[in-house]
Amino acid sequence: ITLLCDCVIIDFSKLPIHQTMICEKKWEGNEMLIFQWNKSYETDIDLIDEQHENLVNLINTLGVSIQQNEKISQTELNDIFNKISQYADEHFRDEEAEMEKATVDSRHVNFHKKANEMFIKESVNLFEGVKNNFISHEVLFHFLSNWLSIHILGTDKVLAKQIKAIQKGQD
């Protein structure tokens, strides 16, 4: 998959996504998949980084729940997914406010908004698939963690560079 943004081309097929985003950890004698946060995800925009890390923690809540339960109850799944969705909405609004405040180029703003909208649409579709037993909880977990990782390493890193350049008076 190749993503073309006005400023960068990212060939995701060359990223070892399965190795960098998800790792196995020991947890009470069992193996568990979690989204491993590290410094490579930092954009150096404090609010954005804090929110990204909070999103990672919420996604990991789903991973822990999958590990602890053979079958997550619909109530628990709804609760976790609603928390992730609501926090993602808040995060996307804050990102858009940061872009507006910094007067980021409208082409990047539009691209970023579309990416966020696609995430919400896909997440809801996958969530419905899980609710209707068409796909596994693990598929939803992997989608959420992989999408967030790719989004941070691609789109959000570009956004951070644009904001910093604007703040320094560069075009």
Image (cartoon, rainbow, N blue to C red):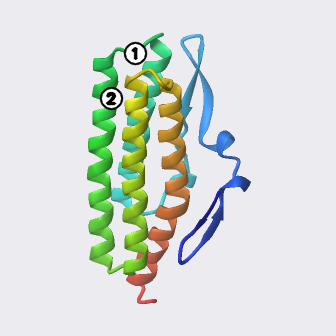
Q: Position of residue 2 (x, y in %)?
A: 64, 62
Q: Which mark is residue 1?
A: none
Marks 2/1 in contact by CB < 8 Å: the verdict is yes
Amino acid carrying label 1: it is Ile
Q: Position of residue 154 (x, y in %)?
A: 55, 61
Residue for point 28% across, 19% down: 75
The part of the image, by quadrant, that contains residue 114 is: bottom left
For this rendering, which residue is in front, 17 or 136? 136
The answer to which of 42 and 146 lies nearer the viewer is 146
Quarter occupied by the N terminus:
bottom right
Residue 19 versus residue 33 in the image, above or below: below
Q: Quadrant of the C terminus?
A: bottom left
Q: Is residue 11 left or right of residue 164?
A: right
Q: Which residue is mark 1?
A: 72
Q: Mark 2 is on which residue type?
A: Ile
Q: Is residue 146 left or right of residue 64?
A: right
Does residue 94 appear left or right of residue 71 in this picture?
left
Label 2 crowd bin: few (<14), some (14–19), many (20+), radius 10 Å = some
Relative image position of residue 69 (x, y in whole percent): 44, 11
Q: Which residue is mark 2?
A: 80
Say what secondary structure mark 2 lies in. helix
Looking at the image, which residue is at 37% across and 50% down? 50
User: What residue is drawn where x is 29% and y is 44%?
Assistant: 87
What x and y, as percent, mark residue 51?
35, 50
Front residue (pair 53, 10)? 10
Give whichever of discs 2 and 1 has the lower sequence position: 1
Q: Quadrant of residue 164?
A: bottom left
Residue in front for this viewpoint, 48 or 89: 89
Helix, strand or loop under label 1: loop
**Total label count?**
2
Q: Quadrant of residue 107?
A: bottom left
